[in-house]
Image (cartoon, grey):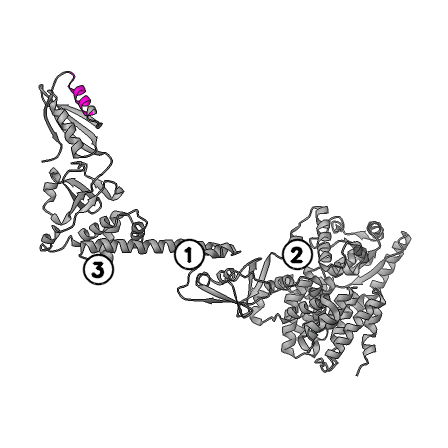
Amino acid sequence: MYAQESLFAKLKSECLAYLSEQDVNAVYQAFLCAFEAHKPQKRKSGDPYIIHPVAVARILASLHMDKPTLMAALLHDVLEDTPVTESELTEQFGEEVTALVDGVSKLTQMKFADRAQAQAENFRKMALAMVQDIRVIIIKLADRLHNMRTISVLKTEKRKRIATETLEIYAPIANRLGMHDFRVEYEELSFSALFPMRYRILRGALTKLQQERATMVDTIAHALTDCLQSHTIEKFELVHTDPHLYGVYQNMLHKRLSFHEVMDKYRFWLIMPDVDTCYRTLGAVHHLFKPVPERFKDYIAIPKANGYQALHTTLFGPHGIPLEIHILTDQMHKMATNGIAAHWLYTSFTHLQDAADPKVRAKAWLQNLSEIQTHTGSSLEFIESVKTDLFPQEVYVFTPMGNIVELARGATPVDFAYAIHSDIGNTCVAAKIDRRLAPLNTRLMNGQSVEIITAPGARPNPTWLNFVATGKARSNIRHFLKQQKRVESVNLGRQLLAQALQVLGRITIEDISEDDWAPILAVTQHKQVDDLLESIGLGTQVPQVVAQRIISTLEEPAPKKSKSRTRKKPPLMITGSEGMLVEFAECCRPIPGDLIIGVLNNGRGFVIHHQNCANMIKACDDPEHYIPVRWEENISGQFRVDLKIELINQRGALAAITAAIASSLADVEDISASETDERYHTLYVTLLVRDRIHLARVLRRLRRLKVVHRLNRRHLK
Ligand code: MN
């Protein structure tokens, strides 16, 4: 059994390097709590469990993370795995630490099923979105790092699962946050866990190469050091690096390069106290070894998209071997390796107001990246995407099956329902959030699981439009309501038509077959029966007229015996304002007061003729086409009527006629003349009159004229 003190000793001395004794004591209290809570537990390796939280805290101490972060790191598994409760934590360590522990526990609870692999991207976004406090992510990353360092004790299957998850989720998150060292270590450990053979072979090849190169590396390092010192550059750090094996492996795999092609260069980092020295160093090394033309990159003046800054140059080293040199400041180096965590590590950032607030830190990191970028006018895309990751506009929730759904911030269960499927949205009646019934207008929060309860026949409520947050829900609801209006119009139209048919008393709508509808639809210019019913419902078609049309169409081929019944048809009342469906025959031009008859003709609509129309005599062979019609009383408007006037051929005759018409308050719409013989003229006049009485007055006035020889309405027998 380890003694408590010795377990804490290393962490303690690491903390004392940058924290006050008082702070270190607070960290120790957290350690004691975790120690007690985890006492009965053992790691898979057989070690006491407390080894793990202490190791996590030490990783974070190496990043100089603050006191609450270290305390939370020590306590990060107690809520999950021990009887210690949230309120006990709050009581002993305060809300800040408890919130961090709670955040880490929630992240841990997010399980990564195989099925969800395709959702890795969403998962990363969600992980970032779920935390209000970036320190939660950093603790979680450290937690994962230690678990990866000790992964060898796990069984093969679990080891592969954890390693895959690390590659797909944690490495990209670390990369996103600029934590390069974490990323590299994740990738190395995952690579070795997933492909132990390949890893071992590459490791062996690298070790062999390093041995072969050791003398040369020494020679170059000495040459570089001497060179810099001769240029009075004394304070610097020289690091020889090799690319990490997962990177080498990726290059071999995707660029189809051999190991030696990937490893063709010697790489050195020269870490300088300031930017000025970086440029002086560049001059010095260019003086020492000849630079390869066009391989120099000034990423200090023009940083890479992720904010990375350094001078890169390639030199012809001793015996012409390629030498890649990266020159950068200490601060750039820390930013390049620790990313967002460098804001805790690097003291020059602590001048920030509210530096203790992790949100301020995270924002400062972004601000810093963004300043570097705007300063140099390069792409802001990366910054924008990181910004949306850290301060997202979306919420991420789970389906009952564990799939992740991304929704706009402020989204409600209704938005969720429509995001799943429009049918679910249209029939949703209630929702469960985290298994509890909740109102449909509840704003969803990250990480909640949402279940929609639907009911067959349920329909969207127009009031949903007041609270939905997504365009998809909005447009679906609108579409449905519009559809609904149509459904209602069609229903109303159907009722009106049924009623009209009932009055006529012969057939019902159900009796009408598809074939029977076709000619009716052709006349009314509707594509479908529902379209026709809709226009009846909306009032643009007169149901009686349609009913009459249906009857006449259906009874066209009917046997003779129905003739007698035809006469019993109740007359359809005509107002003259039916619109397109009812037209007045051009030949006889009936006017209110005339005896009229309706004629249905396929393709011509419903035409009103004068009962004495000359044309009607011919049509009389087929009485099934007739519809009894009658004028409504009190019809307003003007109706055309054609007159044929034979007048004596004398001067002023035409003037007398028009004067007589005008005096009887009728308008002349058209007038034409033809000479019958020397004595008589024939005049054809189209007048606008109100009705038969009005016409009678006009005719009386005309007959009084001496010039009028004969006078009658045209086309009437
Ligand atoms: Mn853990």
| 380 within the magenta span | no
- Residue at (9, 55) in percent of width and height: 561
* Residue type (three-letter) at the residue carrying disc 1: Phe
Nearest to viewer (mark 2 / mark 1) = 1
* Residue 326 seen in this snapshot: no
Residue tagged by mark 1? 480
- Against 223, is 571 above or below? above
Distance from Cα at disc 2 to Cα at disc 1: 38 Å
In the image, the segment drawn in magenta is 651-661
> Within 10 Å of the Cα at label 1, are there few (<14), some (14-19), or many (20+) other Cα atoms?
some
Is mark 3 in CB contact (under 8 Å) with mark 1?
no
User: Which is the main secondary structure of the residues drawn in magenta?
Assistant: helix
- Against 187, is 314 above or below? above
Return the x and y of residue 350 as percentages of the image width and height.
79, 56
> Within 10 Å of the Cα at label 2, are there few (<14), some (14-19), or many (20+) other Cα atoms?
some
Distance from Cα at disc 3 to Cα at disc 2: 67 Å
Earlier-in-chain disc, 3 versus 1:
1
Is mark 3 in CB contact (under 8 Å) with mark 2?
no
- Residue at (12, 39) in percent of width and height: 615
* Residue type (three-letter) at the residue carrying disc 3: Asp
- Against 382, is 458 above or below? below
Return the x and y of residue 302 as percentages of the image width and height.
73, 49
Nearest to viewer (mark 3 / mark 2) = 3
Q: Give SS at disc 1.
A: helix
Whether the residue carrying mark 1 lies under 8 Å from ligand 1 is answered with no
Return the x and y of residue 387 as percentages of the image width and height.
66, 55
Residue tagged by mark 3? 511
